[in-house]
């Protein structure tokens, strides 16, 4: 049975900081941020956007094109949870008006959450071929004003519909997983900001990539040249570039060029949006499909990494007519329509977003019509509204 990605919805909030402005404010050479780290701008979420509202907004990008009655599973992957107990997916299910029969829950393993959901969704569709599954990854990457990781922040969500006979990409048989209990990046319960050992994290990411990629090729009897594109989880685009350099080492010119060109296409959206944790790999996929030139039948290798750490390499094959399921203009517009913040404005909005609003205060959002937002709490219960 052919199972895979039938729809991809993307959302990022409506404000950003330019890396050149940030570099000047932090007394750094802009080229360190633009070239050394590979980021151009980063989305900033104000207090009214959280994992839930962004997850609703990304799913709404395609909801009117699917049969809602067939959705039997809704999985929400995040490391920006809004509650220690209740799943973010329940708020989403209500906002989207999905059936009460839907099985729904939240999963967590750092940036691996959406991939974990995708694999469960694939298994679910195998056993329920007439049903579909929605898998959401939604996060705000926060390291803190003036921190080492500041330049790798971002916010956004990807929502995927998984079904039989998908219209974008079939998931191929097999996968290669690898995990180790390590401390490269984590966020303790008493902190809204992530802790990271950046250099160690990069080293583990590259090590896990080599392990899972080689294992996958061995098990599936494939060579690097058999992939039309390789895409990566991109906390910042330089990280993926380093992995791609390892992938093409010793390969022929044609393979090297093809994988480099497709990596360039895959990093375009992330360089502007920043790190969106769980959704990041799938933002690379969207960027590749919308900015690259792949033909149906192309084999794409995907490297998913969640700190802590869990990695998985798997692949997909593009389906005939996949281009018609994308909306590059709308995705580009979402990024282009963001309002540019000065560094001082960013700092204020960022620091405010770390505070929990006083209970019973109703928050207003400056998002466009039709976008959902967090409207504050009533008796400590989160409220979501739409503009
Ligand atoms: N022009 C071009 N490149 C420059 C430069 C300039 N003027 N100045 C510095 N660079 C390059 C450096 O050579 C380095 O490149 P390299 O990685 O290829 O060696 C890069 O810019 C970063 O410089 P570095 O000195 O290593 O930056 P840093 O110590 O301030 O670290 C981060 C910054 C973002 C790399 C680090 O904080 C980090 O890794 N953070 C997050 C990690 C993460 O997201 N992990 C999550 C889990 S996957």
Image (cartoon, grey):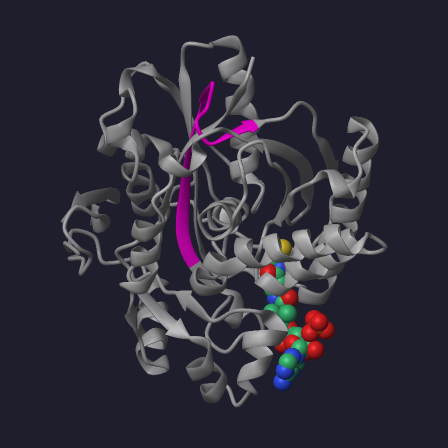
Instruction: Please identify the quarter of the rendering in which residue 29 is found.
Output: bottom right
- Residue 329 is situated, as x and y percent measured from the top left of the image, at 31, 52
Q: Nearer the viewer, residue 237 or 372?
A: 237
Position of the N terminus by quadrant: top right
Q: Which residue is drawn at the image coordinates 69% and 46% (left, top)?
A: 309
In this view, 137 is above or below 365: above
Q: Main secondary structure of the magenta part?
A: strand
Q: Quadrant of residue 46?
A: bottom left
Residue 159 sits inside the magenta stretch: yes
Q: Residue at x 48, y 45 (%)?
A: 289
Task: Name the residue nearer the viewer: 225 or 95.
Answer: 225
Q: Is residue 160 magenta?
A: yes
Q: Residue at x 31, y 66 (%)?
A: 15
Depicted 91 relative to depicted 124: above or below: below
Q: Quadrant of ligand 1?
A: bottom right
Magenta part of the chain: 155-170
Left-right relation of 44 to 78: left
Q: From what the image shows, is residue 106 above or below residue 289?
A: above
Q: Where is residue 331 shown, x and y percent of the image?
A: 34, 51
**Residue 192 visible in rendering:** no
Q: Say whether residue 176 is visible.
A: yes
Looking at the image, residue 158 lies above or below residue 186: above
């Amino acid at each position: 049975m052919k199972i895979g990605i039938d729809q991809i919805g993307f959302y990022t909030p409506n404000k950003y900081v330019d890396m050149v402005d940030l570099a000047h404010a932090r007394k750094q050479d802009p080229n360190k941020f633009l070239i050394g780290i590979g980021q151009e701008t980063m989305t900033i979420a104000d207090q009214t956007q959280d994992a839930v509202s962004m997850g609703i907004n990304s799913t709404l990008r395609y909801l009117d094109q699917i049969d809602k009655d067939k959705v039997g599973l809704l999985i929400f992957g995040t490391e920006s949870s809004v509650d220690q107990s209740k799943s973010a997916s329940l708020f989403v299910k209500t906002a989207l008006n999905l059936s009460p029969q839907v099985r729904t829950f939240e999963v967590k393993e750092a940036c691996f959450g959406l991939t974990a959901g995708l694999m469960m969704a694939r298994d679910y569709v195998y056993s329920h071929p007439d049903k579909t599954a929605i898998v959401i990854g939604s996060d705000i990457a926060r390291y803190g004003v003036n921190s080492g990781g500041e330049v790798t922040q971002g916010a956004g969500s990807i929502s995927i519909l998984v079904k039989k006979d998908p219209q974008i990409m079939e998931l191929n048989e097999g996968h290669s997983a690898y995990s180790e209990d390590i401390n490269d990046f984590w966020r303790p319960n008493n902190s809204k900001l992530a802790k990271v050992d950046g250099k160690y994290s990069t080293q583990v990411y590259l090590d896990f990539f080599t392990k899972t990629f080689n294992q996958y090729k061995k098990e599936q009897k494939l060579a690097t040249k058999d992939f039309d594109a390789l895409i990566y989880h991109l906390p910042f685009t330089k990280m993926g570039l380093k992995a791609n350099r390892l992938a093409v080492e010793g390969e022929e010119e044609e393979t090297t060029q093809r994988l480099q060109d497709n990596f360039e296409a895959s990093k375009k959206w992330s360089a502007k949006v920043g790190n969106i944790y769980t959704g990041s790999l799938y933002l690379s996929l969207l960027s590749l499909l919308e900015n690259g030139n792949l033909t149906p039948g192309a084999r794409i290798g995907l490297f998913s990494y969640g700190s802590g750490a869990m990695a998985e390499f798997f692949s997909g094959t593009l389906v005939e007519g996949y281009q018609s399921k994308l909306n590059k203009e709308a995705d580009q517009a979402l990024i282009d329509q963001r309002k540019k913040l000065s560094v001082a404005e960013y700092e204020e909005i960022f620091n405010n977003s770390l505070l929990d609003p006083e209970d019973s205060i109703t928050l207003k959002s400056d998002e466009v019509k039709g976008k959902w937002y967090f409207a504050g709490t009533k008796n400590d219960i989160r409220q979501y509204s739409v503009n």
